[in-house]
Amino acid sequence: MAVEDAVLPSWSWVSWQGNVQSESWQSGHDYLRQNNSAEQVSRWQTIPTVQWHYSEDLSSTRYPIVSRAPEWRHLYQHTSTLLPPGWKHHTDAATDDSYFTHESIPNHQFWYPIPVGIGNGRASRSRYLHCKTRRASLEVFPEPYRSCTGRCTVVALRDPDGKFAGCLRLNVWVQDARSSQPLTAFDLIELSSGSVCLDNNDGEDLLDHPLTDVFDEWAVPYWDKDRKGIYEFYNVMFIEWKAPGVASRLAVGRVFKSVWERIAREEGEVAIS
Protein backbone atom coordinates (compact mmCIF):
# COMPACT_ATOMS: atom_id res chain seq x y z
CA MET A 1 0.00 0.00 0.00
CA ALA A 2 1.34 3.42 -0.93
CA VAL A 3 2.11 5.74 1.99
CA GLU A 4 -0.32 8.35 0.72
CA ASP A 5 -3.09 5.72 0.76
CA ALA A 6 -2.36 4.52 4.30
CA VAL A 7 -5.14 5.53 6.68
CA LEU A 8 -5.42 4.40 10.28
CA PRO A 9 -9.16 4.12 10.93
CA SER A 10 -10.50 5.28 14.28
CA TRP A 11 -12.12 1.88 14.95
CA SER A 12 -8.66 0.22 15.09
CA TRP A 13 -6.44 0.30 18.17
CA VAL A 14 -3.43 1.16 15.96
CA SER A 15 -4.76 4.68 15.39
CA TRP A 16 -4.60 5.55 19.09
CA GLN A 17 -1.80 6.31 21.55
CA GLY A 18 -1.49 4.61 24.92
CA ASN A 19 -1.60 1.14 26.40
CA VAL A 20 -3.70 -1.51 24.70
CA GLN A 21 -6.27 -3.02 27.05
CA SER A 22 -5.86 -6.56 25.82
CA GLU A 23 -7.85 -7.86 28.80
CA SER A 24 -11.02 -6.72 27.03
CA TRP A 25 -10.42 -9.34 24.32
CA GLN A 26 -10.69 -12.26 26.74
CA SER A 27 -14.34 -13.02 26.08
CA GLY A 28 -13.60 -13.20 22.36
CA HIS A 29 -10.86 -15.76 23.07
CA ASP A 30 -13.01 -18.12 25.10
CA TYR A 31 -11.97 -20.97 22.81
CA LEU A 32 -8.39 -20.90 24.15
CA ARG A 33 -7.50 -23.29 26.94
CA GLN A 34 -4.85 -21.46 28.93
CA ASN A 35 -4.83 -21.27 32.70
CA ASN A 36 -8.60 -21.07 33.02
CA SER A 37 -11.03 -23.86 33.72
CA ALA A 38 -14.02 -24.45 31.46
CA GLU A 39 -16.25 -22.97 34.18
CA GLN A 40 -14.20 -19.75 34.37
CA VAL A 41 -14.32 -19.31 30.60
CA SER A 42 -18.12 -19.42 30.61
CA ARG A 43 -18.34 -16.61 33.20
CA TRP A 44 -17.93 -13.81 30.62
CA GLN A 45 -19.67 -13.96 27.26
CA THR A 46 -19.95 -11.69 24.23
CA ILE A 47 -22.98 -12.23 21.99
CA PRO A 48 -23.06 -10.85 18.41
CA THR A 49 -26.06 -8.61 17.71
CA VAL A 50 -24.83 -6.71 14.64
CA GLN A 51 -23.80 -7.86 11.16
CA TRP A 52 -20.61 -6.06 10.10
CA HIS A 53 -19.17 -5.39 6.64
CA TYR A 54 -15.93 -3.76 5.55
CA SER A 55 -14.95 -1.76 2.47
CA GLU A 56 -11.99 0.12 1.05
CA ASP A 57 -14.01 3.29 0.52
CA LEU A 58 -17.61 4.38 0.96
CA SER A 59 -18.70 3.49 -2.56
CA SER A 60 -16.76 0.25 -3.09
CA THR A 61 -17.99 -3.30 -2.58
CA ARG A 62 -18.82 -4.23 1.01
CA TYR A 63 -17.67 -7.62 2.25
CA PRO A 64 -19.30 -9.35 5.21
CA ILE A 65 -17.27 -10.06 8.32
CA VAL A 66 -18.18 -13.59 9.33
CA SER A 67 -17.24 -15.24 12.61
CA ARG A 68 -18.09 -18.93 12.69
CA ALA A 69 -16.63 -19.57 16.14
CA PRO A 70 -20.02 -19.41 17.95
CA GLU A 71 -21.47 -21.82 15.38
CA TRP A 72 -18.58 -24.25 15.85
CA ARG A 73 -18.79 -23.98 19.63
CA HIS A 74 -22.39 -25.17 19.48
CA LEU A 75 -21.72 -27.76 16.78
CA TYR A 76 -18.79 -29.46 18.53
CA GLN A 77 -19.81 -29.13 22.17
CA HIS A 78 -20.41 -32.88 22.27
CA THR A 79 -17.25 -34.97 22.01
CA SER A 80 -19.14 -37.64 20.07
CA THR A 81 -19.54 -35.28 17.09
CA LEU A 82 -17.31 -36.06 14.12
CA LEU A 83 -14.51 -33.50 14.21
CA PRO A 84 -13.41 -31.41 11.22
CA PRO A 85 -10.15 -32.39 9.50
CA GLY A 86 -6.97 -31.79 11.49
CA TRP A 87 -8.62 -31.70 14.93
CA LYS A 88 -8.11 -34.17 17.77
CA HIS A 89 -9.96 -34.58 21.06
CA HIS A 90 -8.16 -34.98 24.42
CA THR A 91 -9.14 -35.46 28.07
CA ASP A 92 -7.11 -33.95 30.89
CA ALA A 93 -6.35 -36.77 33.31
CA ALA A 94 -6.09 -34.40 36.29
CA THR A 95 -9.25 -32.32 35.76
CA ASP A 96 -11.28 -34.52 33.38
CA ASP A 97 -11.69 -31.47 31.12
CA SER A 98 -12.20 -32.08 27.42
CA TYR A 99 -10.07 -30.05 25.03
CA PHE A 100 -8.87 -30.10 21.43
CA THR A 101 -5.71 -29.55 19.37
CA HIS A 102 -5.11 -28.90 15.68
CA GLU A 103 -2.32 -30.54 13.72
CA SER A 104 -1.08 -27.20 12.35
CA ILE A 105 -0.58 -25.70 15.85
CA PRO A 106 -0.16 -28.73 18.15
CA ASN A 107 1.15 -26.69 21.10
CA HIS A 108 -2.09 -24.72 21.43
CA GLN A 109 -5.06 -26.16 23.28
CA PHE A 110 -8.68 -25.22 22.63
CA TRP A 111 -11.94 -25.73 24.48
CA TYR A 112 -13.65 -26.40 21.15
CA PRO A 113 -12.57 -26.50 17.48
CA ILE A 114 -12.54 -23.23 15.55
CA PRO A 115 -12.12 -22.45 11.84
CA VAL A 116 -8.39 -22.40 11.08
CA GLY A 117 -7.25 -20.06 8.31
CA ILE A 118 -5.05 -21.21 5.48
CA GLY A 119 -2.69 -18.28 5.94
CA ASN A 120 -2.05 -17.50 2.27
CA GLY A 121 -5.01 -15.25 1.55
CA ARG A 122 -4.66 -11.71 0.28
CA ALA A 123 -4.76 -9.09 3.01
CA SER A 124 -7.94 -7.03 2.92
CA ARG A 125 -8.01 -3.25 2.91
CA SER A 126 -10.75 -2.14 5.23
CA ARG A 127 -10.78 1.57 5.92
CA TYR A 128 -14.50 1.51 6.68
CA LEU A 129 -16.69 -0.71 8.82
CA HIS A 130 -20.40 -0.75 8.05
CA CYS A 131 -23.38 -1.94 10.03
CA LYS A 132 -27.05 -1.42 10.71
CA THR A 133 -27.45 -0.99 14.44
CA ARG A 134 -29.42 0.61 17.22
CA ARG A 135 -28.36 3.95 18.62
CA ALA A 136 -29.22 6.30 21.43
CA SER A 137 -27.85 9.24 23.42
CA LEU A 138 -27.05 9.31 27.11
CA GLU A 139 -25.89 12.07 29.40
CA VAL A 140 -23.02 11.68 31.84
CA PHE A 141 -22.40 12.43 35.49
CA PRO A 142 -20.17 15.50 35.84
CA GLU A 143 -17.25 13.88 37.69
CA PRO A 144 -14.83 11.75 35.59
CA TYR A 145 -12.93 8.87 37.16
CA ARG A 146 -9.63 7.15 36.50
CA SER A 147 -9.67 3.62 35.14
CA CYS A 148 -8.37 0.83 37.33
CA THR A 149 -5.51 -0.04 34.99
CA GLY A 150 -4.22 3.24 33.60
CA ARG A 151 -4.57 6.96 33.13
CA CYS A 152 -7.61 6.77 30.88
CA THR A 153 -10.76 8.55 31.97
CA VAL A 154 -13.92 6.68 32.90
CA VAL A 155 -17.19 8.58 32.63
CA ALA A 156 -20.40 7.32 34.21
CA LEU A 157 -23.49 7.34 32.01
CA ARG A 158 -26.94 8.16 33.32
CA ASP A 159 -30.34 7.23 31.95
CA PRO A 160 -33.21 9.69 31.29
CA ASP A 161 -34.27 9.31 34.94
CA GLY A 162 -30.80 10.37 36.15
CA LYS A 163 -29.83 6.88 37.32
CA PHE A 164 -26.48 5.16 36.70
CA ALA A 165 -26.62 3.34 33.36
CA GLY A 166 -23.08 2.23 32.53
CA CYS A 167 -19.72 3.76 31.66
CA LEU A 168 -17.26 4.62 28.90
CA ARG A 169 -13.47 4.56 28.94
CA LEU A 170 -12.15 7.61 27.11
CA ASN A 171 -8.71 7.79 25.56
CA VAL A 172 -7.74 10.89 27.55
CA TRP A 173 -6.20 11.50 30.96
CA VAL A 174 -8.46 12.40 33.84
CA GLN A 175 -6.89 15.84 34.25
CA ASP A 176 -7.49 16.58 30.56
CA ALA A 177 -11.11 15.49 30.86
CA ARG A 178 -11.63 17.75 33.88
CA SER A 179 -10.20 20.78 32.09
CA SER A 180 -12.07 20.22 28.82
CA GLN A 181 -15.55 21.47 28.00
CA PRO A 182 -17.99 18.84 29.34
CA LEU A 183 -20.24 17.12 26.85
CA THR A 184 -23.95 17.17 27.58
CA ALA A 185 -24.69 13.92 25.77
CA PHE A 186 -22.93 11.01 24.12
CA ASP A 187 -24.07 9.50 20.82
CA LEU A 188 -23.82 5.73 21.22
CA ILE A 189 -24.24 2.80 18.86
CA GLU A 190 -24.69 -0.87 19.75
CA LEU A 191 -21.77 -3.24 19.07
CA SER A 192 -22.87 -6.46 20.79
CA SER A 193 -24.39 -7.74 24.00
CA GLY A 194 -22.69 -9.53 26.85
CA SER A 195 -22.90 -10.92 30.34
CA VAL A 196 -20.57 -11.77 33.20
CA CYS A 197 -20.95 -13.57 36.49
CA LEU A 198 -20.44 -11.17 39.40
CA ASP A 199 -19.90 -13.88 41.99
CA ASN A 200 -16.25 -14.20 42.92
CA ASN A 201 -15.16 -17.77 43.51
CA ASP A 202 -13.40 -16.72 46.69
CA GLY A 203 -16.44 -14.85 47.99
CA GLU A 204 -14.38 -11.68 48.26
CA ASP A 205 -15.19 -8.10 47.34
CA LEU A 206 -16.12 -7.46 43.71
CA LEU A 207 -12.98 -5.34 43.30
CA ASP A 208 -11.01 -8.57 43.83
CA HIS A 209 -12.85 -10.18 40.92
CA PRO A 210 -10.41 -11.41 38.20
CA LEU A 211 -12.12 -9.13 35.64
CA THR A 212 -11.97 -5.90 37.64
CA ASP A 213 -9.36 -4.53 35.20
CA VAL A 214 -11.95 -4.75 32.43
CA PHE A 215 -15.17 -3.64 34.10
CA ASP A 216 -14.50 -0.06 35.19
CA GLU A 217 -18.10 0.45 36.31
CA TRP A 218 -17.56 -1.78 39.35
CA ALA A 219 -15.29 0.87 40.89
CA VAL A 220 -17.61 3.81 40.15
CA PRO A 221 -19.41 4.96 43.32
CA TYR A 222 -22.82 4.72 41.64
CA TRP A 223 -22.44 0.94 41.20
CA ASP A 224 -24.79 -1.13 43.38
CA LYS A 225 -22.36 -3.07 45.57
CA ASP A 226 -25.12 -5.47 46.64
CA ARG A 227 -25.67 -6.60 43.08
CA LYS A 228 -25.15 -10.34 42.59
CA GLY A 229 -25.60 -13.01 39.96
CA ILE A 230 -25.32 -12.27 36.24
CA TYR A 231 -24.55 -8.77 35.02
CA GLU A 232 -26.08 -8.23 31.55
CA PHE A 233 -25.12 -5.32 29.33
CA TYR A 234 -24.65 -4.03 25.80
CA ASN A 235 -21.23 -3.10 24.45
CA VAL A 236 -21.48 0.34 22.88
CA MET A 237 -19.31 2.79 20.99
CA PHE A 238 -19.27 6.54 21.57
CA ILE A 239 -19.14 8.12 18.11
CA GLU A 240 -18.69 11.53 16.53
CA TRP A 241 -20.50 12.19 13.27
CA LYS A 242 -18.16 13.34 10.48
CA ALA A 243 -20.72 13.35 7.65
CA PRO A 244 -24.23 12.01 7.16
CA GLY A 245 -24.00 8.30 7.99
CA VAL A 246 -20.22 8.44 8.62
CA ALA A 247 -18.76 8.51 12.13
CA SER A 248 -15.49 8.16 14.03
CA ARG A 249 -14.89 6.12 17.16
CA LEU A 250 -14.19 8.11 20.31
CA ALA A 251 -14.59 5.49 23.04
CA VAL A 252 -16.20 2.18 23.93
CA GLY A 253 -18.00 0.98 27.02
CA ARG A 254 -21.11 -0.71 28.35
CA VAL A 255 -24.74 0.19 29.06
CA PHE A 256 -26.96 -1.87 31.34
CA LYS A 257 -29.15 -4.20 29.28
CA SER A 258 -32.39 -2.97 30.85
CA VAL A 259 -31.52 0.65 30.07
CA TRP A 260 -30.33 0.10 26.49
CA GLU A 261 -33.39 -1.93 25.51
CA ARG A 262 -35.57 0.86 26.85
CA ILE A 263 -33.88 3.81 25.15
CA ALA A 264 -32.34 2.43 21.92
CA ARG A 265 -35.41 2.80 19.75
CA GLU A 266 -33.71 4.20 16.65
CA GLU A 267 -31.97 1.95 14.13
CA GLY A 268 -29.89 3.04 11.17
CA GLU A 269 -26.90 2.47 8.92
CA VAL A 270 -23.52 3.77 10.01
CA ALA A 271 -20.04 3.68 8.47
CA ILE A 272 -17.12 4.00 10.89
CA SER A 273 -13.94 5.49 9.46
Image (spheres, rainbow, N blue to C red):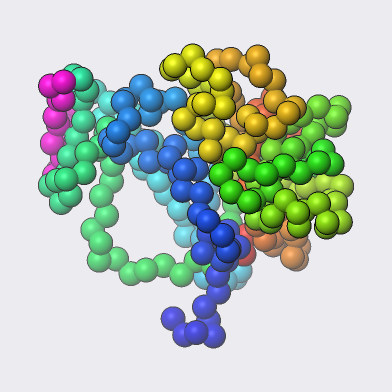
Residue drawn 47% across the image and 43% down it: 23
Residue 267: x and y, percent? 71, 43
Q: Relative to 202, is 268 above or below?
A: below
Which is more toward the observer, 107 or 117?
A: 107
Q: Is residue 61 visible?
A: no
Q: Left or right of 163: which side holds 18?
A: left
Q: Is residue 271 magenta?
A: no
Viewport quadrant of the C terminus: bottom right
Q: Is residue 87 magenta?
A: yes
Q: Is residue 187 visible?
A: yes
The quarter of the displayed image where residue 27 is located: top left
The quarter of the displayed image where residue 253 is located: top right
Residue 2: x and y, percent? 47, 85
Which is more toward the observer, 131 or 216?
A: 216
Q: Left or right of 139: which side holds 167?
A: left
Report the span colored magenta.
80-94
Residue drawn 28% across the image and 36% down it: 34
Which is more toward the observer, 240 or 35?
A: 35
Which secondary structure dominates the residues rendered in magenta? loop
